[in-house]
Image: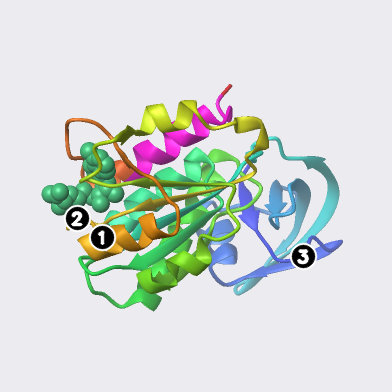
Amino acid sequence: MKRFFIRQPTETVVLDGNEHTHLSRVLRLKPRDEVILCCGDGYDYRYRIERVDKNSSVLTQLDRVRNLCEPRVHMTVFSALMKGDKPELAAQKLTELGVNEIVLMTTKYAVPQNSMTRRERVERTCMEAAKQCGRAGYPKVDLADFSELPERLRGFDAVIFPYEKATEYSLSAYLSRLDGANIRTVAVVVGAEGGFADEEAETLIGTGVTPVTLGKRILRAETANIVVAALVMNALGEYA
Ligand code: SAH
């Protein structure tokens, strides 16, 4: 059944804007068709379409069931801004992998761009990906400058920092030492195409974060985002 995102699962819901366009013009749904509406509270709400007008559609709630697709672990990926449509590519895959929050990060070697436009595009991508893979919510998309990281990383149960110049610890050695049962919140920090500046790595290391290597080959930034999120989710038992 087709899925849409709303703010409040009230008895009657009026869909407008993009969600209405999607329902009426793209999917060509009609009165009496049923859809799932979600608001990020962990439930799937089943609705029946009552009316489809030019600019809005009206739906009434039938029932709700718990959505079983949401992960137990809350993962935030701090992803340095990449070129072209790479942020959207990474966001689509991160959504499928179960990530809860994506923070588009400005770093010394990140690609300068209009962050607000990018944030909106990435959020839209997350919403579409979440619909496709059946999630009850889509990742929140936020912006941050690298200088905010020490503050923003405080409070996470684990921080994973793949760094291209790391040699001492591998990601897999690091993950095998984590006590998954006690980890509810995890942050992943990944560089852009240009990687991290030495002083940025030092700043993170200074806050107690351990840099880890992903092995012999340097991965493209978007690949690193996806692979690290998947391996960490797996190590924490999300794909069991
Ligand atoms: N331009 C850099 C590579 C950046 S790769 C260089 O030539 O060294 C982009 C990001 O992906 C990195 O900042 C890091 O977070 C991650 N990454 C890619 N390959 C990695 C590896 N082998 N080990 C650790 N991190 C890696």
Give the distance between the C-alpha atoms of the residues marked 3 and 1, in whole angstroms. 34 Å
Q: What amino acid is at disc 3? A: Gln
Q: Residues within 10 Å of mark 2 (few under 14, many from 20)?
A: some
Whichever of callouts 2 and 1 sits on the residue coming sooner in the sequence is: 1
Can you give x and y, in whole percent of width and height, for residue 104 in the image?
39, 64
Whichever of callouts 3 and 1 sits on the residue coming sooner in the sequence is: 3
Q: Residue at x 55, y 26 (%)?
A: 239
Residue 8: which disc? 3
Q: What amino acid is at disc 2? A: Glu
> Which residue matches tag 2?
193
Give the distance between the C-alpha atoms of the residues marked 2 and 3, in whole angstroms. 39 Å
> Which residue matches tag 1?
82
Q: Residue at x 35, y 75 (%)?
A: 115
Total tally of numbered discs in the picture: 3
Q: Residues within 10 Å of mark 3 (few under 14, many from 20)?
A: few
Can you give x and y, in whole percent of width and height, for residue 78 in the image?
42, 57
Is residue 233 magenta-colored?
yes
Q: Look at the image and tell me whether residue 197 can be seen.
A: no
Q: What amino acid is at disc 1? A: Met
Magenta-highlighted residues: 225-239
- Picture quadrant where residue 40 is located: bottom right
Q: Residue at x 44, y 59 (%)?
A: 207
Q: Nearer the viewer, residue 195 or 61?
A: 195
Classify 117 as above or below 79: below
Circle 3/circle 1 CB separation < 8 Å: no
Badge 3 marks a residue whose secondary structure is: loop
Badge 2 marks a residue whose secondary structure is: loop
Q: As drawn, is 52 to the left or to the right of 48?
A: left
